[in-house]
Structure formats: structure tokens, C-alpha cells
Amino acid sequence: MSNAKDTNMLLDACEMAVKKALSLGAHDVEAYASYSKHTSVFLESNDIKHVKVNEPNGIGIRVIYDKRVGFASINSLKHESIEYAIDNALSIAKASKRDKHNILAEPVNVKMLSNIYDKSVESLSIDDVVNYARDMLNTAKGYDPRVSVDSGVFEASVLIHAIHTSTGISLHERISILSYSIMGMARDGSMVSNFDVQSNASHMLKGTDANINNVALNFAKNVVNTLNSKGCESFKGQMVLAPNATIDIIKEPIVFSVNAYNVLRRASRFTNMLGKEVASSNLSIIDDATFTDGINASSFDREGFACKRNVIVDKGILKTFLHNTYTASKLKVNSTGNASGSINTPPLIDSTNFIIEAGDISYDEMIKEVKHGVIINRFSGNVNYVDGNFSGVVKGGYLVEHGEIKHPVREVMVAGNVFDAIKSISMLSKERLLVVDSLLPYIVIDNVSFTG
């Protein structure tokens, strides 16, 4: 598809859907359409396994009739299919419960982002994508013959999304995405390392060679370095979270807790906590869809509302929840531009790019300050987003004693509570690592239980 042709096709489909639904009696209509092309190369058992090219498109139609909402979606942009979806959406709306907060977003000024679309990505051939995947595999395998790649993928994608509403919103945007991951272990005779996963993504082709090299080498080093892992005695000490582990243990429960839907249904630990202390004073968290290095950068959200930078926690104080138009109306605030979802669902709520502000100490100096603790590069276990309790196995971990990294650890359990943990943060590193949609420092949390 050409740039103009596929964009116009989406906009035409959205405009037609809105006009048709209004003519059939809908009071307000939102049509959200997308087209994407994905070229994916999969790795399996130390080899390139297969290539897949996929070009899905479709449209989601939300109608409001007497403050009652109905939604239907189709994986097609044909007019007859759109009319069928509109009929379904209207039928659902007329049978639904009336809610005065069922409204659509109003038009606002949207500043279109640059640096989230690279035509070079769209120009990549299948052979180009295969070569990137092969480079990632060869770099990991070339680091040490004991490295074994269980699986991986390199994917080049282009997404166009468009929205048109009866309230006057009409927007479209083109986004390119390169994403890649590699996972596996190291084997030395009967000795097997910890399993490791490394991934990253970007919008721009420039720098991809270096980024792939870093991902593959980090994976290879992690698995080789944990071949000689040992157990350790049970103790209560300091947990040093690497960015990948922070995503599982810290990020996801916080994102759940600041989701206004969860606040409204009182499933959030942060209900009634706005303006209050919820974390250590050295913790500040940002949600920022305008951060173009993050893969979730976008100019507008699922409802066509302008995306922006939102301060969630400022020096330990909870500043905002994340909203779409519905929750903003219900709680009498402005939307934060966090309506999320695809053509297959009505607008939901989610974070965009999750950022934790850097600390004031280098990683090396941070480790020297750790008296007795474990560095956790990856976490495998359970986290309860409602009460915050977590427990699981430390993966790719290292024992630290009196400021020195002693040895990799094996089968060490860690347990605690997320909401207690973020109040016990004692250090954050100056260095931060971008992992797909999260920019995170290393974090030291005190008084955590480890079981050897």
C-alpha cells in the first residue's frame, strides 16, 4: 500500500461509518480504524525457523444512543461489513444501561510527534529482516559456544491508525516499530544456566545494528555468567532490582493501581490516596506518550485525545490517576490521554511509556553500599496487583555481601509486598535502561526476605 492510499482508505472508512451510524439514529459515533504490516522472523533451537508476513486491518465502531453505548468491530474495511457492524453496535446500545458518563472525547489541539515513523523501516525487505534476526542469533552464539538460543524474534512493523468522531475529531498517524527478543540458556555438560530473556524495540532504523548487538550480548553474558550459580542461606536484606525485574515487580502493580477504572471499582490500593505519600521520597514516576524513544509513543490516544506527559508520583506523593474520557467524566477531572486498546475493544485505560526518574548514585557505588542483598535481573513468580503481595524465584541473580558481588545464585526465593517495598527504596541509580516502553534505573529496596 502507498502512504496516501492506505491513509485515505482508513479515513474514508471512518468517515463513512460515522455518517452512516448518525443516519440510523445514533446520537454520537466514534470510528477507529487501523492497518498494519508485520514482517517477522522467528528463531528456534539455535536456527532461523520461519518467516511470517501479516497485514491486518479493520475498524471498531462505538455508538452512543441516549447515553447508552454499543460497540462492534470487524477485520474489514468494506462498506457492507461496516454497515453490519453499525447495526450490531446500535442494537447493543439500545439494550444497554443508560449512563450519563457515556460521552465521546471533544476535539483538542494535538501536536503530532516526529521520530516515531521511519520510512526506512517500511522499505525493509524480507531478506533484510532475516539478516537482522541472523545477526542477533550469531552474536549470541558467537559470544560463547555454550550459549543455546531457545527462541527469539525480529519484527519490522508499520502501523497506521485513524479516528473520526461525530464530535469533530479527525486524526491519523503512521508509526514504525522494530522489535526483537531472544531467550534461552547456556549448557556446559550437565550444567545448565538460568533461563534469560532480553528484548528491546525502537521506532527508527538508525542504531538497530548496535541495539541488536547489545541485546544479544547481554543475553549471552547473563546465561554464561550464571552457569556456576550456587544457593545461599535464607536472610532478610536488600533487593537490587534490575530494570527487567522492576517491570514485573514494581511497574505492573503500580500501573494497575493508578488505572482509574480500578480506582472506581475500589480494586486499587491507591483509592483515596491522591495527594498523599505512597512511596519513598526518592521515587518519581512519569507516564509519557510524548517520549519518542519509548515504543508506546503516540500523538493521540484511542479516543483521539492528545497524549501528554503525566506525573504519576512526585517524590513519593501520588499526583494523578490515568484516565480516559469516561473515568475523567465520572471523577470530574480531565482525561490524561490514556485511552488504550485496538479496533477490537472500546477504549480502555493503560500506561504509555513508563519512566522512573534517575537517582543520584552510580550503579557501581550503589553496589558498594549494599551490605547483604541479591541483585535480581529477572523475576519468575506471582504478583497480586490488588494487595501487592509477591513471591517467586530470583532469575539471573547475584549475591552481594559487604559491597562485593560474590557469585550467581540459584533457586533463591524472594517474597514481599510491592506497596511496602516502594516505601523502602533507599537508592536509585543514575544509569537508566530503556526496555521497550520503560525507562528505568536500578533500584535498591531494604528489608526484603530471601529464602535459600
Image (cartoon, helix red, strand yellow):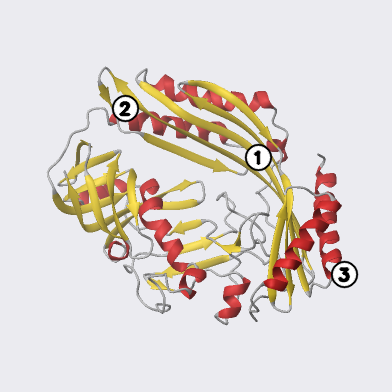
Q: Tag 3: residue type?
A: Ser
Instruction: Identify the image quadrant of the C terminus.
Output: top left
| Sequence-wise first label, 2 or 1 | 1
Residue nearest the observer in this picture, 174 or 381: 381
Q: Is residue 304 left or right of residue 405?
A: right
Q: Which residue is painted at 18% across and 34% down in the image? A: 230
Q: Which residue was labeled with disc 1?
A: 157
Q: Give above or below for 266 relative to 194.
A: below
Q: Which residue is painted at 37% across and 35% down in the image? A: 196
The quadrant where residue 16 appears: bottom right
- Position of residue 388 measured from the top left corner of the image (x, y, whole percent): 33, 62
Q: Which residue was labeled with disc 2?
A: 224
| Sequence-wise first label, 2 or 3 | 3
Count of marks overlaid on the render: 3
Marks 2/3: CA distance? Answer: 65 Å
Q: Give above or below for 426 relative to 166.
A: above
Q: Which residue is painted at 55% across and 31% down in the image? A: 209
- Position of residue 236 measured from the top left corner of the image (x, y, whole percent): 15, 54
Mark 3 neighbour density, 10 Å: few (under 14) some (14–19) many (20 or more) = few
Q: Do tag 2 and tag 1 residues touch (Cβ < 8 Å)?
A: no
Residue nearest the observer in this picture, 318 or 187: 187
Instruction: Identify the image quadrant of the N terminus.
Output: top right
Q: Which mark is residue 447?
A: none
Q: Tag 1: residue type?
A: Ser
The quadrant where residue 42 appears: top right
Marks 2/1: CA distance? Answer: 32 Å
Q: Give above or below for 443 relative to 135.
A: below
Q: Kindly report which numbered mark, 2 or 3, lies closer to the viewer in this rendering.
A: 3
Q: Which mark is residue 23?
A: 3
Q: Secondary structure at mark 2?
A: helix
Marks 3/1: CA distance? Answer: 36 Å
